[in-house]
Amino acid sequence: MTKARTNASASPAVGRNIIQNGAMNVAQRSASVTGLGASAGYFTCDRWKLNFAGSTAGRLTMSQTSDGPNGISANCIKLDCTTADTSIAAGEFAILQQLIEGQNLQRLGKGVAGAKQITVSFYVKGSRASTQVCNLYEGDNNRHIGATFSVTTDWTRVEITFPADEDDGSSPLADDNTVSIYFQIWLHAGSNYTGGTIQTTWANYVANTTAAGLDSLFSSTDNNFFITGVQMEVGPVATEFEQEDFGTTLAKCQRYYYQLTSEGTATNYILGSVESATAAAMGGLAFPSEMRAIPTAALLGTNITKFYSAATGTDVSVALTTNRCSKNIGSFIIGSFTGATVGQSASLYNGGSGSGISFDAEL
């Protein structure tokens, strides 16, 4: 169901929204990335992944844009088609999705007797009138459900209530830190996913019932799509979008991804202390939030790390060679430098704006 934005009369307890960063406020990686369409990844707003498959020639720019609906969020995700693809292969798709841990979904009681209904709501607009698809894919038991929704050139609130999935009583969601449900907004798809009739009740996954009726974002370079205020909650009622303070949202996002970069044009931003060895040095820092899993450390940007030896006073470009992180501590080894002596103190510096180090534990 699609309708103009209204405020619900009820205001249930804090924490009812299962979706994280639904207001699109946090974007640690970047505010805008161009040329997307060849490979999946997290690019701008935290927790929001773009997934692509097949040989699509379509390309888009993803950005965090200050154009959200008044009273809901100042920010939204904007997806702007920059290269059209009107010859759609059967196996193509483009999806905006959020992957949700099973241990955050136990309130749904899904797959067993007494399972609850799920209501999702979000605010959308576009450059044209179109029909898109919202789909929930449940990976633990390979089940799914979906619904079409309408997009106009004005902000509207979409509200969709999905029925409970009691199944046969033997397929609960895993109570762990792996993905159980994929919240998905379908943007483009070939006949492998659109050739049937959309599945509007929970059922075992059949690909061609996933996105039937979908209009492609890649049909024209005039197309764009905006979304914010995304909420997923237990029950049959779409309540008012839950407003969450920025610090709480940031901490939730840092469970999955954390990075240290320079501020503005500043250089020589200390990322961590290291203890030198003949050709390598070890550094570490405490994460602000315990991460979902042991993360992978990576250097960001160009002209990145410089190894400063207290004895020589020399900056030397280095590379991160070994990841020894835990869920609470970012520990890493850097190498490929010379002139250091065992026991020297050292610091890892940022070589320029946007450079730094990241720790990734995304689903």
Image (cartoon, rainbow, N blue to C red):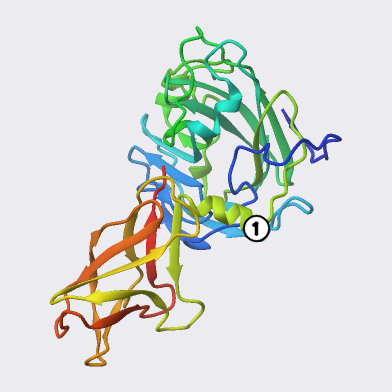
Q: x, y percentage for residue 76?
A: 63, 53
Q: How many marks?
A: 1
Q: Which structural element holds mark 1? A: helix
Question: Is residue 218 shown above or below 214?
Answer: below
Which residue sits at x=47%, y=28%?
A: 175
Which image quarter: residue 308? Answer: bottom left
Q: x, y percentage for residue 135?
A: 54, 29
Q: From the viewer's perspective, is 288 left or right of 73?
A: left
Q: From the viewer's perspective, is 311 left or right of 84?
A: left
For disc 1, the marked residue is 246
Question: Is residue 111 shown above or below 264?
Answer: above
Q: Tell me which amino acid carries mark 1.
A: Phe
Which image quarter: residue 200? Answer: top right
Q: Is residue 80 visible?
A: no
Which residue sits at x=72%, y=41%?
A: 14
Which residue sits at x=72%, y=44%?
A: 242
The one nearer the camera, 219 or 95, is 95
Which image quarter: residue 148? Answer: top right
The one nearer the camera, 302 or 199, is 302
The one nearer the camera, 97 or 255, is 255
Q: x, y percentage for residue 186?
A: 52, 35
Question: Is residue 353 shown above or below 360?
Answer: below
Q: From the viewer's perspective, is 27 left or right of 142?
A: right
Quarter of the image with the N terminus is top right
Q: Residue furthest front?
A: 343
Q: x, y percentage for residue 315?
A: 27, 87
Question: Is residue 114 shown above or below 326?
Answer: above
Q: Residue furthest bottom?
A: 312
Which residue sits at x=31%, y=62%?
A: 331
Q: From the viewer's perspective, is 219 left or right of 131?
A: left
Quarter of the image with the C terminus is top left
